[in-house]
């Protein structure tokens, strides 16, 4: 069944499969947990859109990663100007006195999926059109080599401003990714904060004995 299709009413399904309503509802809950259907009170059960994967085992930009999986990704530039980084950004970028504040909205197949706020060390990219160009590629064009990145992902909820941009109700659950990208000399080049809709994207990685290493830490509480 294509995404968005409505399943038959529960009574019809239980009769068709010869099971009780309790058994059917348990099966539907499992399908919903697996991300295959969405149960909407008062409306019915619907086939969900397939989720794209946000991979943690590659050093690529968000759009590059999803395009490599065959997804249509477009970017809207919401703001791009030189500013003095706020204190919470300076804690990541170090002694950067001026930086390009780049605010973008990423659309997946035309649907808002990610709000991304990037702070780029220096002013070289202040006038660069980044609507169709990878930030990493733009840095490489200026001889700046990206060497590694440190990223943390935590659960969060949409604030009013982000909810408006992502066309979701305030308080909608989301992933919040903070990434610091470093150059060859380990100078921090970019600080990214991406708010990712979990209804459209899932986080996926692959593990091997000699491959990706992951650590889980508890968030500090105030």
Image (cartoon, helix red, strand yellow):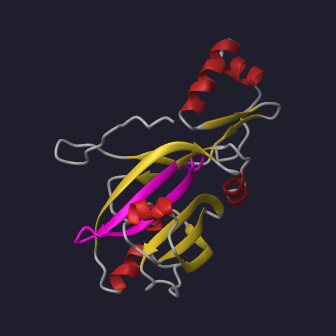
**Observer-nearest residue: 149 or 53?**
149
Q: Of 35 and 12, which appears nearest the observer?
A: 35
In the image, is residue 222 above or below residue 72? above
Q: Quadrant of residue 45?
A: top right
- Residue 63 locus on image (x, y percent): 48, 66
The answer to which image quadrant residue 220 occupies is top left
Q: Residue furthest right?
A: 42
Which residue is found at the position 52% from the left and 58% from the top? 194
- In the picture, measured across the screen, residue 115 lies left or right of residue 168, that is left
Is residue 63 positioned above or below 154 on the image? below
Q: Is residue 143 left or right of residue 46?
A: left
The span picked out in magenta is: 176-201
Q: Nearer the viewer, residue 215 or 62?
A: 215
Image vertical order of residue 79 relative to residue 178, above or below: below
Q: Position of residue 207 (x, y in %)?
A: 27, 43
Residue 52 appears in the picture as rendered: no
Q: Residue furthest left?
A: 210
147 sits left or right of 210 in the view: right
Of residues 123 and 209, which is closer to you in this image? 123
Q: Specify whether residue 104 is painted magenta.
A: no
Quarter of the N terminus within the rendering: top right
x 38%, y 74%: residue: 136
Residue 198 x %, y %: 57, 46
Q: Residue at x 60, y 32 (%)?
A: 32
Q: Position of residue 66 (x, y in %)?
A: 46, 61
Question: Quick check: can you spot residue 186?
Answer: yes
């Amino acid at each position: 069944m294509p995404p968005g299709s409505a399943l038959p009413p529960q009574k019809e399904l239980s009769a068709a499969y010869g099971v009780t309503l309790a058994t059917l509802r348990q099966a539907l809950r499992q399908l919903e947990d697996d991300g295959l259907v969405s149960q909407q009170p008062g409306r019915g059960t619907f086939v969900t859109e397939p989720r794209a994967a946000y991979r943690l085992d590659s050093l690529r930009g968000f759009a590059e990663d999803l395009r490599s999986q065959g997804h249509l990704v477009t970017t809207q530039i919401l703001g791009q100007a030189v500013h003095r980084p706020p204190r919470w950004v300076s804690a990541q970028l170090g002694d950067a006195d001026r930086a390009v504040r780049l605010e973008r909205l990423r659309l997946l197949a035309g649907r808002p999926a990610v709000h991304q706020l990037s702070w780029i060390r220096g002013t070289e990219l202040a006038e660069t059109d980044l609507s169709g160009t990878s930030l990493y590629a733009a840095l490489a064009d200026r001889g700046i080599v990206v060497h590694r990145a440190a990223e943390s992902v935590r659960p969060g909820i949409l604030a009013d401003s982000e909810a408006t941009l992502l066309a979701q109700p305030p308080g909608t659950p989301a992933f919040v990714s903070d990434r610091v990208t470093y150059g060859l000399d380990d100078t921090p080049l970019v600080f990214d904060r991406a708010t990712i809709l979990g209804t459209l994207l899932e986080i996926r990685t692959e593990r091997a004995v000699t491959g990706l290493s992951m650590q889980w830490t508890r968030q500090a509480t105030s």
